[in-house]
Image (tube, grey):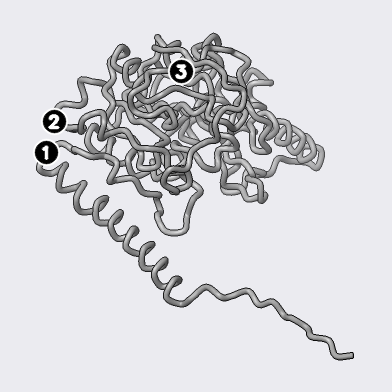
Amino acid sequence: MQRTVRILHTAPVPLLTRIRKRSKKSLDWFRGWFRAHVVLPWLCWMKKPICDLSVFARRIPFIERREYSQNGEDGIIAAVFAKIGTTNRVCVEFGVEDGLQCNCRYLLKHRGWTGLLMDGGEWPTTIHKQNNKHIHEQTANSQQGGWRATGGEEEGPALHESSARRRGDSEALEESARRHGAGRSGDWRAGALAPPLSPDKGGNNHSLGVHQEFITAENIETLFEKYSVPPEFDLLSIDIDGNDYWVWKAIQNFHPRVVIMEYNANKGPNLSVTIPYDPAFRWDGSDYQGASLKALEKLGREKGYTLVATDPCGVNAFFVLAPLVPGNFDPPPFAQIFHQPAYKGIPGKGHPPDPLKRTWIET
């Protein structure tokens, strides 16, 4: 009896398709490079305002690297501060998960900024877990007759500071701050804002530590005080997939120059809505989260900010203090600033509809 054996072969990606994809990536890289290194310096030199910030969206570095911002926000952030300059180079961001991909990461790692990263989740790189590990390692090392570095590239400021605080040694704290660059941008408690290097999920010592804190409208300013955030600083980024509108509204005594807010592009450009405030809210993966762009634009205006851009994927909105806008930015009309959802770069892709059909409130 003769058997016929079928062998299924996976068709290789056609060569022309691969060439087309690679060509598109190369063209995107060149456009990003040209805008960042030619167009932006020219606009700054000529003192001309930027009309469309979204064209500067790019990852830095751009090709095949996703460990910084998610949707090219790094490029927009660079363009904003190229125009308005920096003051204390302090940034605050919450809703960063493990901190490996967020809006402040590039600034903290490569531009000498100090900052505060927070997230409510149980991530392996949170400060609390890292501190416990450091304390254990320090104890083990001291029992072996001396302290040795455990922080990868540096000796680990968290170790010096935690040890000094337990001893009440103020001189050691000041020395730690001087050695690791903390406190150079303001008068707040030395080292409070400097996240130490922490192992990432692969065990490499290059991720920035994240403080594990569940953010609410009631505790946000208390947390800023706890970590000695200065009253005025350069950048605030909010992405908690829930009470974003209410948390920003609750920030009254701290005044960042630039605010990045995640908006719910699924609600379109015309609705001014947000979810009702619930301090225990946790996102379920549906489109029931956050607030519409119009609601955030109205709130920003009330707080003295101007909406200047959104990223091309319809995720983040960029606000600048109103006095800093004239001469630096000439944003297009609101209808043009709004970007439809294109999550992961796929046009029309947004979060699935809320299966519970919960109510929204108008603002």
Coordinates of residue 353 in the picture (x, y in percent): 54, 31
Of label 3 and label 2, which has the lower sequence position?
Answer: 3
Tell whether 109 sits left or right of 3: left
The answer to whether one can see residue 356 in this image is yes
Of all residues, the one furthest to the bottom in this rendering is 2
Q: Amino acid at mark 3?
A: Thr
- Whether 189 is drawn above or below 116: the answer is above
Say which quarter of the image contains residue 9: bottom right
Under circle 2, the secondary element is loop
Q: Amino acid at mark 1?
A: Lys
Of label 1 and label 3, which has the lower sequence position?
Answer: 1
| Residue 327 - label | 2
Tell which of 202 and 39 is nearer to you. 39
Coordinates of residue 306 in the picture (x, y in percent): 26, 23
> Disc count in the image?
3
Give the residue drawn at x 61%, y 47%. Answer: 205
Mark 2, Cα crowd under 10 Å, few <14 / some 14-19 / many 20+, is: few
What residue is pinned by disc 1?
Answer: 47
